[in-house]
Image: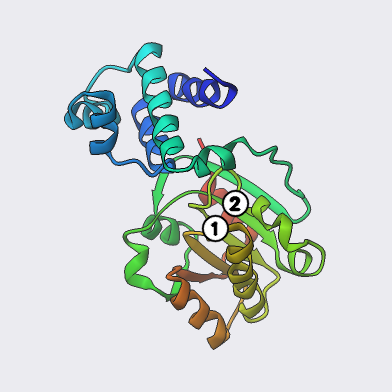
Amino acid sequence: MDQLSTTIAGEICLSKDPGGSMKKWREIFNVSQTDLAEFLKISSSTISDYEGGRRKSPGIGVVSRLVEALIEIDKNLGGKIKKQLEKDFKPRENVFNVHEFSKAVNGKVFAESIEGEVVANQLKLKETNVFGYTVIDSLKVILEVPVTEYMQMYGKTPERALVFLKVESGRSPMIAVKVGRFSTEMKPNIVVLHGVEKVDPIAIKIAEAEKIPLLITNKSLEGLKDALKKFEE
């Protein structure tokens, strides 16, 4: 097993909820239970039972096979997810504060946790999951960070929420997300504007065009981090 496979397998085996961790990584690799089961030549119900905790915790042999299957399936599709995970990720900590969740968090649950108000794509929020979040200093990312470094905001996976601080209307952060998509081929699953009272209509139009749920919250930054910390454990 290579370093990435070993890291993923180790996380699953050491997790308090190995089934939930298995599900998290399967969803990060965007592989369905059916496709994974077919690749492993087992039933999809077996995958479901492991992920749901209905089978005893899998041994390292089972976990190794599962991880190698995810990476091989990704390789057959171009290997984009593996490449993202293997990047030498050293984010600018004064600009990007990256947090990863232990398992997928539904968009509606995420919004409720941060007392977020949905201003675009409310229906899509219910069918959206996030695997982490990044707190971003809006002024610094716009003024100091070149577009080529925007990938740093996505951590291990773009299936996350981007929380923009120091926001006046939301237009600039959404433009940054749109520009970043063209340079990185990535976009977040949710965007949160912190402390904004009235969202610029252009920001809402960009969110709608990109099909990204857009939220606003006035919860204190420390309160927001405390609310989300439970998903990191």
Amino acid type shown at disc 2? Tyr
Apparent side of residue 28 relative to residue 19 in the rendered image (left or right): right
Classify mark 1: helix, strand or loop: loop
Q: Image point 41% across, 60% down: which residue? A: 112
Residue 12 image-quadrant placement: top left
Closest to the observer: 142 or 180? 180
Residue lying farthest to the bottom in this orientation? 201
Q: Are marks 2 and 1 in contact (CB under 8 Å)?
A: yes
Q: Closer to us: mark 2 or mark 1?
A: 1
Is the residue 209 above or below the residue 90 in the image?
below
Residue 107 image-quadrant placement: bottom left
Is the residue 196 above or below the residue 42 in the image?
below
Residue 160 locus on image (x, y percent):
51, 53
Instruction: Identify the residue position indicated by label 1 in the image.
Output: 186
Amino acid type shown at disc 1? Met
What numbered label is drawn on residue 202? Answer: none
Closest to the observer: 50 or 66? 66
Residue lying farthest to the right in this orientation? 144
Crowding around mark 1 (Cα neighbors within 10 Å: few <14, some 14 to 19, many 20+) is some
Q: Earlier in the sequence, mark 2 or mark 1?
A: 2
From this viewpoint, is residue 222 visible? no
Q: Image point 44% across, 68% down: which residue? A: 213
Apparent side of residue 22 relative to residue 115 in the rendered image (left or right): left
What numbered label is drawn on residue 154? Answer: 2
Residue 53 locus on image (x, y percent):
27, 27
From this viewpoint, is residue 188 visible? yes
Estimate the spatial distance between the alpha carbons at disc 2 and disc 1, rounded to whole Å. Answer: 8 Å
Q: Image point 55% across, 42% down: which residue? A: 100
Classify mark 2: helix, strand or loop: helix
